[in-house]
Amino acid sequence: MSTIEHADGHMRCSWPGTDPLYVAYHDTDWGVPEQDSRALFEKLVLDGFQAGLSWITILRKRDNFRKAFDNFEPQSVARYGEKKMASLMQDAGIVRNRAKIEGAVLSARAYLELSKTQDFSHFIWDFVDGRPVQNIWRERREVPAETDVSRRLSKALVAKGFKFCGPTIVYAFMQAVGMVNDHYVDCCRHAECAALAGRMGRKQAHRKKQ
């Protein structure tokens, strides 16, 4: 089933189950349009760490990741050298994968290089014309693992030097940061995220008129 009714009477996407941490993430984070460049960088890196794992595994370690990676400030992560990466490989609070740790550092350096000419948030959101795509999914089988947009964004990120950003990872990122509204239409959060997208669209239209 795509949605389930919770004890509070709300219908929610079935994927978080009833795990309180996962439900809270579903209700307050996933699908909410995110425009802060640092936060977008954090989520992209964490989605890279998720590769081959479940998101709940990363979510349970997110606070540890933030502490270990200096709150994912790109300027800090980009300076990591061999000593720091070796230290991270000893940190049981995160996913200790050398390639992913090195990938985070390289992605931070790519972020800084991109930022010389374009804001990272603008770069990301331009792929959906600055406004979240509203999908109407009713069944799990309808939701794609990747799309033409995620493939184009993935290709662009790779070309800029970002790591662990294949089209499937990028589509999960797009869902999480609200570039697409992939809450099932019967989920209580679908309409709420759609309303946030509407306000975002109106602000963008107002800026264009100025």
Image (cartoon, rainbow, N blue to C red):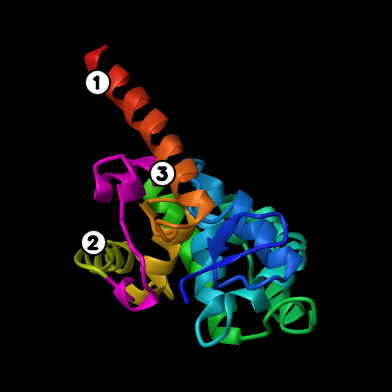
Residue 160, given in percent of the width and then of the height, sits at 32, 61
Q: Secondary structure at mark 1?
A: helix
Which numbered dot is residue 149?
A: 2
Residue 103, compared with residue 43, is above or below; it is: below
Which numbered dot is residue 208?
A: 1
Q: Which range is magenta?
A: 117-146
Q: Earlier in the sequence, mark 3 or mark 2?
A: 3
Q: Are marks 3 and 1 in contact (CB under 8 Å)?
A: no
Q: Earlier in the sequence, mark 2 or mark 1?
A: 2
**Comparing marks 3 and 1, which lies closer to the viewer?**
1
Q: Earlier in the sequence, mark 3 or mark 1?
A: 3
Q: Residue at x 55, y 47 (%)?
A: 38
**Comparing marks 3 and 2, which lies closer to the viewer?**
2
Which numbered dot is residue 121?
A: 3
Q: Residue at x 60, y 85 (%)?
A: 98
Foreground residue, 123 or 50? 50
Q: Secondary structure at mark 2?
A: helix
Residue 144, given in percent of the width and then of the height, sits at 30, 73
Q: Secondary structure at mark 3?
A: helix
Q: Quadrant of residue 72?
A: bottom right
Q: Quadrant of residue 10?
A: bottom right
